[in-house]
Amino acid sequence: MLKLIKYEFRKNRTLLLTILGIIAALEAYFLISAHLAEKYRLLDAFSEATQKTEINLAVSMSLLAAASFGTAMAVFVMGVVGYSRELNQKTSYLIFMTPNSTMSMVGSKLLFTLLTGVGFAGLLLGLAAADFPIFSDAIGSEWRGYYNLLDIFMTSNDLSLTGALLTIAFYVCVVFLSIISTVSVAYFAITLSATFMRGKKGHALVSVAMFLLLSWGISRLTSLIMPDDVYDILRSTSDLMRVMAPQGLLDVVVLVLSLLSCAWMLKKRVDL
Amino acid sequence: MLEIEHLTKRYGRKAAVSDLSLTLGAGRLAALLGPNGSGKTTLMKMIAGLATPTAGTIALDGMRVGKEMKAHVAYMPTEGYFYNYMTALDAGRYYRDFFHDFNMDNYLSALAKESLDPKGKIRTMSSGMVAKVKLALTFARGSRLVMLDEPLNGIDIVARERTLETIQANHGGERTMIVSSHLVDELETMIDDAIFIKDGELVLAGDANALREKHGMSIVDMYMKIYGEGATLNA
């Protein structure tokens, strides 16, 4: 499966490099804006030039935030469209001729999407953490003060740093699980359209409708198992785990069922 | 040995292959003959695991179509099937990564013999050059079963000669080879077996020499009799 994942990255290299290029350009824009904002602020904090550089800084940060959202969307679309295209183009021969199980074929695409998503999320979070002190310096704010404030808040609420990090890590895992489970539902709809429904009129439309319907059904199920006052009852990591575990479990079930169904449909009714 | 029993492939109400049974021995070179739309490609795709039969079974040396059998089947589709980014070298690396029987040295020397640049992008190559890359990839594998789908299509007469030479050079040993074509005269002299299919049904199959003797005519003439106007030849 590792080799299949390697070729997923190779196939999408141009798109991935383009996204990285955009992020790098926006980060450079932010760094230059921050540098200029700090420089002009030190010369004259209230000058027109300083205001302009601060506006530039705000724009660069907004663009970085927009790029984060755009990246998430691009990774999702790349994962789903890439799979759909694979089943409908002759390049699929390259994968289906190889001695790999259908489970490995679908699994590798899903893992590629997950790894790309995690990679970009890590990169963007890392940039956010690195950019925060730079931003604070640029606008003349003492960034350590924010951390001290956070420290005071955590101490007064009896929260440990380890606990907070665990909570964040758990939350991020559940979010990623939820996203990848949604991608797997999309795979299920695409596979159904490309196998059992191939050649039937309007199969693409039915596939989209099926994805929307399944996603809606799963979200309804999630809302049923989640308490209404979810954010009121969260006090600790164990609270979060207790509340979110059923949702995570549901996502795992959906993910496994989708994967098994896709592999089975491709094995039984592949038609390239 | 390739054994096909009661193989059927339906697309809705239309049968692309219908109740086809066939056995091909090891080391045989068979021509799969029939006009366009007769079911040749569908049959090959089912053997290669790219299409699932509606009914029937396929087995190569006892292995059913699946992961295990795919490791021993080299299929050359008639269409281009490479990723846009691929150079001839990338395609070789891909095959090396997935097929244990792929020999990179043989592949590169086959490319060199055809004066093809391994670093050339496949998507920018002419159809004749792509056909040569596909052929080099297929024969660089030591597969038990090799299937070439219309290898003589879309290439000039010189390339056609070279392709036929390559097929002949790789014929022998335990390797079973199936070559589909409607250019029968080109294959007449080199084949061991002939398989005629029409509208998805097996019309005539067997040892080429035995068929010639039995019907008192060449394979080309049999083709004309089977597919020409007022077809008269039957098994």
Image (cartoon, helix red, strand yellow):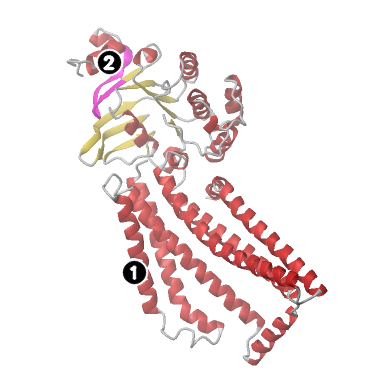
- Rendered position, B130 above or below A138: above
Q: Chain ID for label 1? A: A
Amino acid at the residue labelled 1: Gly
Amino acid at the residue labelled 2: Tyr
Instruction: Tell me the quadrant of the picture where the C terminus of chain A can be found.
Output: top left
Mark sitting on residue B223? 2
Where's residue A208, x and y in %?
A: 35, 57
Name the residue that disc number 1 marks: A217
Where's residue B231, x and y in %?
A: 19, 16
Please indicate, yes or no, whether residue A169 appears anywhere in the rendered image. Answer: yes
Q: CA gap, disc 2 to disc 1?
A: 58 Å
Q: Chain ID for label 2? A: B
Q: Do marks 2 and 1 share a chain?
A: no
For label 1, the SS is helix
Q: Observer-nearest residue: A86 or B173?
A: A86
Is residue B116 found left or right of B66 in the rendered image?
A: right
- Rendered position, A175 above or below B41: below
Q: Are marks 2 and 1 in contact (CB under 8 Å)?
A: no
- Rendered position, A238 above or below A213: below
Residue at x-position 34% and y-position 20%: B182
